[in-house]
Image (spheres, rainbow, N blue to C red):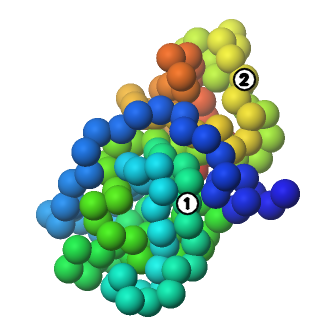
Amino acid sequence: MTSRQILAAAALMATVGPATAQSDVELPYWASISVDKARMRKGPSPDVPVMWEYRRKDLPVKVIARHENWRKVEDPDGTQGWMAARLLSRTRTAIVTGEIRPMREDASVSAAVAYRAEPGVVGRISDCKNGWCLFAVNGRKGWIQTDHIWGD
């Protein structure tokens, strides 16, 4: 199974707030998918073909362009396309990359491991500093190195 198939088929990891227009934010910026099903299209219109259908609420995306109520986004695999702005939220999320990654009790490689996260796990991030982010997945929190996640 490819990482894109995993991303497209994976279940919801957390709940996010309502989508925002996001028209006043400097490009590029991080966003996340705010609905259970979102379509990426070849262009900024409901009349152009769908490239992908994402079934992963909270999946991080990078917004790289705007056109009216549409946002050109890049997904964790590097695929770029257009999504309606109403499908996106500014909730900060990230996806674990590579291999199983430690989530530590403090922002240090010498800190005890609180949890381990598998590749493809999506969680909320906060309090990022010095190459670390506080990463929360289903009520479990730990510090993860920013080079072990995509979306920070």
Label 2 element class: strand
Q: For the view shown, which residue lies furthest in the right direction?
A: 1
Q: Is residue 151 visible?
A: no
Q: Quadrant of the N terminus?
A: bottom right
Q: Quadrant of residue 88?
A: bottom left
Name the residue: 41% across, 50% down. Answer: 35
Q: Nearer the viewer, residue 82 or 78?
A: 82
Q: Where residue 149 sits in the image (x, y, percent)?
A: 60, 44
Q: Where residue 90 sits in the image (x, y, percent)?
A: 31, 49
Which numbered tag is attached to residue 132? none
Dot 2: few (<14), some (14–19), or many (≥20) neighbours within 10 Å?
few
Q: Are marks 2 and 1 in contact (CB under 8 Å)?
A: no
Q: Is residue 38 visible?
A: yes
Which numbered tag is attached to residue 116? 2
Q: Earlier in the sequence, mark 2 or mark 1?
A: 1
What residue is shown with label 1?
A: 54
Residue type of the residue flagged with mark 1: Tyr
Residue type of the residue flagged with mark 2: Arg
145 to the left or right of 45: right
Label 2 to label 1: alpha-carbon separation = 25 Å
Name the residue: 46% across, 62% down. Answer: 38
Q: Quadrant of residue 78?
A: bottom right
Label 1 element class: strand
Above-or-below relation of 27 to 10: below
Name the residue: 44% across, 89% down. Answer: 48
In front: mark 2 or mark 1? 1
